[in-house]
Image: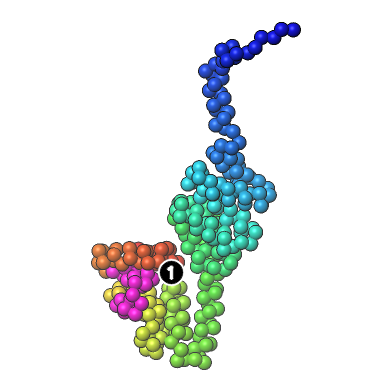
Amino acid sequence: METSAITPASRPRLSLAASALVAVLAACSPSDPAVQAERQWHVCESSVFDQQRLDACSAVIASAVTEPSQKAQALVHRGTLRVRLRQDARAIADFGRALRIDPGLVSAYLERGQLHFNREAFEAAVRDYEAALSLNPALSDAQLMRDAALRSLEERSLGELEWLTRELAENPLESGLWNNRCWLRAVSGEELDLALADCNEAIRLDPRSAAALDSRGLVHLKRGEYSAAVADYTAALALDPERGHYLYGRGVARLRMGEEAAGRADIAAAERAEPGIRRTYQGYGVEI
């Protein structure tokens, strides 16, 4: 049988529609980074196998085409998996990275708060639950967990207070013990008169204790003695310059005295020196 050769001119031509379809299929090929990232995202969200999910979430996080919001969510998923795998330090790092990308990501605060609670880091747990509630006050589970963390802190403080009292009976010249008891009472906000007496004794024994001056500054702050608080925080800063903790306390006291510019300057410097210091003070019951 005679066959005719197919010349370039006689080859069938693709229609415009067919050409467009080929282009779309090529763009959606398995090697396309966006398609691969989307597939990994579905595995990260829903796989029942922990290691498979962990690998997929890591791929989503590492992908250059992943949107920031999705990367933050993948970090939360991976952090939650790492908690289950007893990789607590890595989990905390993942939740922290997620919050740096999206400071309003409630799930990151909740998951990290639960991890802190399980590790009995109750102050950190309270800060995370408070942060979640500031974003969504209707979160009843967060309210319950925050209250549980606060109760645990109170119970721990009572135990530590009893221990410190016994230690002071045997070591009355230890400035650090007096300061520690003062600090516990200052943070709880109860027995502030006794707290002040403890701090005064700590400073009498060691006048150059910046920590004791800081503790007494908090006592004065909670007693509404703002001028005295400023004096103590300033004295602490003279011993340990640019310490964010002392700057923040002085800034709050100055604001409450009506010294707006000086107070805001101290608080800004404190947050540069110690990022997150505002939440630390919120854990002490101190709000701007």
Residue 235 screen position, x and y as percent: 31, 79
Quarter of the image with the C terminus in it: bottom left
Could you tell me which residue is drawn at 58 percent across and 53 percent down?
78
Q: Depth check: 223 or 72 in front?
A: 72
Q: Residue at x 37, y 69 (%)?
A: 244
Q: How many dots with numbers?
A: 1
Image position, residue 241 (x, y; %): 33, 75
Give the image location of residue 126, x and y in percent: 50, 64
251 part of magenta stretch? yes
Span highlighted in magenta in the image: 231-254
Display colour scheme: rainbow
Q: What secondary structure is found at the residue carrying circle 1?
A: loop
Is 253 displayed left or right of 172 in the figure?
left
Image x and y of residue 251, in percent: 31, 68
Q: Residues within 10 Å of mark 1 (few under 14, many from 20)?
A: some
Q: Is residue 92 above or below residue 157?
A: above
Provide the major secondary structure of the magenta segment: helix
Q: Is residue 45 left or right of residue 167?
A: right
Of residue 91 and residue 110, the one placed in the foreground of this image is: 91
Q: Nearer the viewer, residue 176 or 91?
A: 91
Say if residue 216 shows up in the picture. no
**Which residue has dot 1 on it?**
284
Query: Is any atom of residue 119 visible in this view?
Result: yes
45 or 189: nearer the eye? 45
Q: Quadrant of residue 236?
A: bottom left
